Amino acid sequence: MSDFKLQTADTAAPAGREAIEKAEKGFGFVPNLIKVLANAPAAANAYLDLGTRLGNTSLTPPEQQVVLLATSFENECGYCMGAHSTVAGMVGIEEADLEALRDGTELPTTRLNALRDFTRAVVQKRGNVTKDDLSEFRGAGFEQAQILEVILGVAMKTLSNYTNHIAETPLDEAFEAQRWSPPVASGRA
């Protein structure tokens, strides 16, 4: 079990308290991830800022969740899969698409599948995607800016995925219905 403290507004340093208050205002509660990240206020504030910036991209809210879930799937982050599966339902991702994202299988929605595939390629290849990867992504109607926006989402989720692995962040009750464990045979290359 990890010894990372779940900070509160009462226990966090001033900059960490700022992140906790911002999360509570934005989400209606303080997710355990933010409580962990508040141990390093710069990390907590960076994560929240990246989330705000991702929200201001040309990717739709469902597309943003596809990027975040695909990254979390590849990084095998149970916490983020649970959290973003919950959010995905709230922003209108179809149940069949969400199930495929959680299972690592092909999504029935062609555009979202192309986005998931490109995100997976970025994560698996550490950004060294091929011309074919780029061509397939662009062929699905995505533009150059969205290539960079996917990288933004991958960066955001990598910060939280790695934090959750190291800190063993407990899943919040609000996400419990979407608890996730990596598939035994995910079919990943």
Image (spheres, helix red, strand yellow):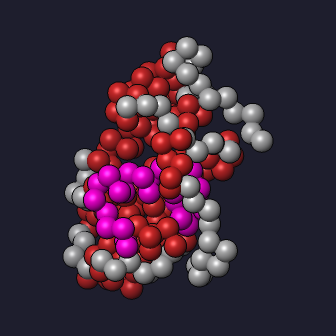
Task: Report the quarter where the N terminus lies.
Answer: top right
Left or right of 157, for residue 139: left
Q: Does the magenta run of residues contain 138?
A: no
Q: Position of residue 3 (x, y in %)?
A: 75, 34
In the image, is residue 84 above or below residue 9?
Answer: below
Q: Residue at x 36, y 57 (%)?
A: 88
Q: Residue at x 51, y 23 (%)?
A: 16
Left or right of 140, for residue 153: right
Left or right of 185, for residue 46: left
Judge whether residue 132 can be spotted in this image: yes
In the image, is residue 132 above or below residue 142?
Answer: below
In the image, is residue 34 above or below residue 10?
Answer: below
Asked whether 170 or 174 is in front, the reply is 174
Which quadrant of the view contains residue 64?
bottom left
Q: Position of residue 186 (x, y in %)?
A: 60, 77
Q: Which range is magenta?
A: 72-97
What is the tally of numbered marks visible in this picture?
A: 0
Task: Report the quarter where the C terminus lies.
Answer: bottom right
Asked whether 7 or 50 is in front, the reply is 7
Judge whether residue 128 can be spotted in this image: no
Which quadrant of the view contains residue 75?
bottom right
Q: Position of residue 145 (x, y in %)?
A: 26, 62
Q: Residue at x 29, y 80 (%)?
A: 110
* Furthest-front residue in this view: 177
In the image, is residue 81 above or below residue 30?
Answer: below
Which quadrant of the view contains residue 67?
bottom left
Q: Does the magenta run of residues contain 93?
A: yes
Q: Residue at x 46, y 65 (%)?
A: 70
* Furthest-bottom residue in this view: 132
Instruction: Characterize the magenta stretch by its predominant secondary structure.
Output: helix
